[in-house]
Image (spheres, rainbow, N blue to C red):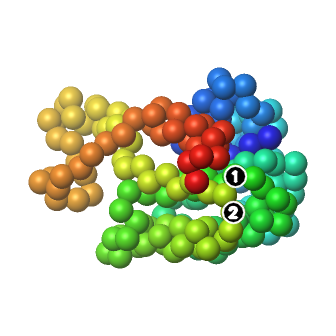
Amino acid sequence: MILVTGAAGKTGLAVIRKLKENGDPVRGLIHQEAYRNTVQAAGADETLLGDLLNPEDIKRAMQGISAVYHIPPNVHPREVEIGEIVISAALGKGVEKFVYHSVLHPQIEAMPHHWLKLRVEERLIASGLSFTILQPTAYMQNITSQLQRIKECGIYQVPYPPETNLCLVDLLDVAQVAAIALADTSHD
C-alpha cells in the first residue's frame, strides 16, 4: 500500500489516479472530512483523516505502508516540522521507499517556501530511508485559473517580474514520474 499525503490537492489527486492506473493500492491522507469523497473518487482504496503535525496520526497513516509520496501543504511555516514527523514515522514503520514532493531550486533563500523544502530534503537525505526527491516547477495547469482574465484583458498576471525566465511542467507528467519513483528502487 502506498500512502499519499496531501491527497486532496491537485497533485495528490493526480498521483492517486496514476497509481491506481498502474494497479497500486493507495491510502490517501486528508486533513478535512469534506475531501474524503473526492479522494475516493480519484481511486484511493482507503482515506484517512489526519493532521500532519500530529505524530500519532502520521504513525497510524503509515501502518501497513510500503511507500510514501509526501506532498506538504503549500507555503506552510512549519513545513520542516511536518517533514520531520513524516520522515520519522516512515522510519519507525519500516517504509521501503519515500518520495518527497519538493520544488525546483529549493536553495533560493529569498523564497521562504523553497528554503523550507531544502531543509526537509536535508533531513530526508540524512534519514537513511530509500528516497527520491522530485523538484517540479510550476504546473502548466495553473494557467487555466487565469484563462478568463487572459481572454478578457489580454493579461496573464504573475507574482514575479514578467521578464523572468520560467519553465512549466504538466501535472500529469509529475504524477507519472512519482509513480515510477515509488515503484522503482533504482531511482534512489
Compared across the picture, whether 58 is left or right of 109 comes to: right
Q: Which residue is mark 2?
A: 129
Q: Which residue is mark 1?
A: 97
Compared across the picture, whether 37 is left or right of 137 comes to: right
Residue shown at the point (53%, 56%) measured from the top left: 133
Dots 1, 2 in contact, CB < 8 A: yes
Quarter of the image where one finds residue 168? top left
Residue shown at the point (14%, 35%) measured from the top left: 154
Q: Position of residue 35 (x, y in %)?
A: 69, 41
Residue 69: tell me if it is visible: yes
Q: Is residue 54 above or below residue 133?
A: below
Compared across the picture, whether 26 is left or right of 59 comes to: left
Residue 15: tell me if it is visible: no
Disc on res. 50: none
Q: Is residue 160 above or below residue 182?
A: below
How packed mark 1 is, by other alpha carbons closer than 10 Å (few <14, some 14-19, many 20 or more), is: many
Residue shown at the point (47%, 70%) measured from the top left: 118
Residue type at numbered disc 1 = Lys
Residue shown at the point (27%, 46%) measured from the top left: 167
Compared across the picture, whether 137 is left or right of 99 comes to: left
